[in-house]
Amino acid sequence: MAKEHKPPTQRKHAAAPQRARAKQPAVSSAVPTSTAATAATSTADPSTWRVSRLWAGRRINKTRALNEYRLKPEDLEGLACKAKEKYHAGFTVNAQMYKEQDIERKAWERHGGPDAFEAYLQKLRERHAKANKTTPFVQPAQYNKPAAGTVGVVQYNPPPATYDRYVGSSAVLSEIKMQMAPWLWTACNKALDGVDAADYPYNGVDGGSYSRPKDREGPMQEALRLAYKYPARGETPLPSSPAVDNLRAVLADAPRFPPDHLHGKHVDGMDMKEICSPEYNFVYEWETSYLDRVFTALMQVIHAHGTGADGWFSARWEVYDKYVECFGGLSYKRKDGVWSDISAHWLDGQYTIDGKDILFSVPSRSKSSVGREYNAMLPHKTPQDGGYVGFRRW
């Protein structure tokens, strides 16, 4: 761009105010006049801090409170907590459950307010990303932000342009929706619809437990805890190729979970298992011969296109969607307040299969040599106590 030329008289007059300002006395440092100083004073004053966005009834155990909020055991002294029995690794343990609002407040006090705590987490988040660690960054779900240059399921979306009946007028749900991928937001809300449908016709005159948006705030805040475990999902399906087309042809033959009137009876293409605990029921899974067809088709995709976005990373989502269609996906247990996804194991990376290192909820990959061969080809080993997609771990 050409530099603007000014007549000599203009340059002379323009320089005069600068010389005049240089002669003005300095302002005393005892009076905070800058915006930054005012903001610092405001941050230090707890009366100016924003209201917590957490559901008032939400609780968190001691281990997660210390890890996610970067606190020390002495920070929790004096906070009210409740003991809750939990079954873990074959043992019953008493977990100390704190109100998460109290924990969040302690973190704010420790770091100088909500903005300072978020800034601290952002600094740690960037350090974690630069270190190229394979484990997810540990943080409270409501502070989830994808690292720069990455795309994840927890992401910021523009405010919705149209009315969403699941949000209603709830500011909490509006914020959760902005942090969730659209497919996951829809799946979680449909799962809550399913809870109400299962209770019909025993619902009261006001409808089911989650008929009002406000009643969904607690469960949907819990859903954010599992959201970051899901891998990124592409917006467009894989282009056609011999390997991809073969996988889709195999999935088109997928056996489906039997309707209610056939439950407990043999279904072609499925293995059925009778269980008695925690209650009498029948569990169905694709039979080994069909699973081997799926595993073989996925291995062909890996051989042809690799394990990246053009291959397995995207192909696994097509298997996941088919499994959801056949068996169901996300579900919510109202009594326990726990989300789970019976189809999510199709999104997981490599499992360690040596008897003790890992127990998987659906042992489909260990049922045959083909499944074990497929498992060995996958990236991202899943550690014993880490990141099962879709399953919340205490």
Image (tube, rainbow, N blue to C red):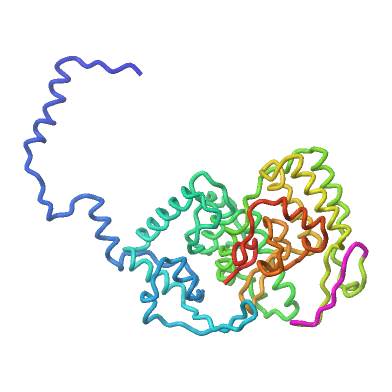
Which residue is pictured at 51% across the width and 63% down the height? 141
Q: Quadrant of the N terminus?
A: top left
Q: Is residue 3 left or right of residue 336?
A: left
Depth order, front residue of 205/228: 228
Depth order, front residue of 349/267: 349
Q: Is residue 96 left or right of residue 390?
A: left
- Residue 43 coordinates in the image, percent (x, y): 30, 61
- Residue 26 coordinates in the image, percent (x, y): 9, 44
Q: Is residue 272 left or right of residue 127?
A: right
Which residue is pictured at 61% across the width and 70% down the height? 212
- Residue 344 coordinates in the image, percent (x, y): 70, 61
Q: Is residue 276 magenta?
A: yes
Residue 146 visible, this angle? yes
- Residue 156 coordinates in the image, percent (x, y): 52, 51
Classify 250 as above or below 289: above
Which residue is pictured at 57% across the width and 72% down the height? 394
Q: Is residue 85 magenta?
A: no
Span colored in magenta: 268-278
Classify 300 as above or below 135: above
Residue 193 visible, this angle? no
Which residue is pictured at 21% across the width and 49% down the height? 34
Q: Residue furthest front?
A: 354
Q: Quadrant of residue 113?
A: bottom left
Depth order, front residue of 277/179: 277
Q: How many marks?
A: 0
Classify 348 as above or below 23: below
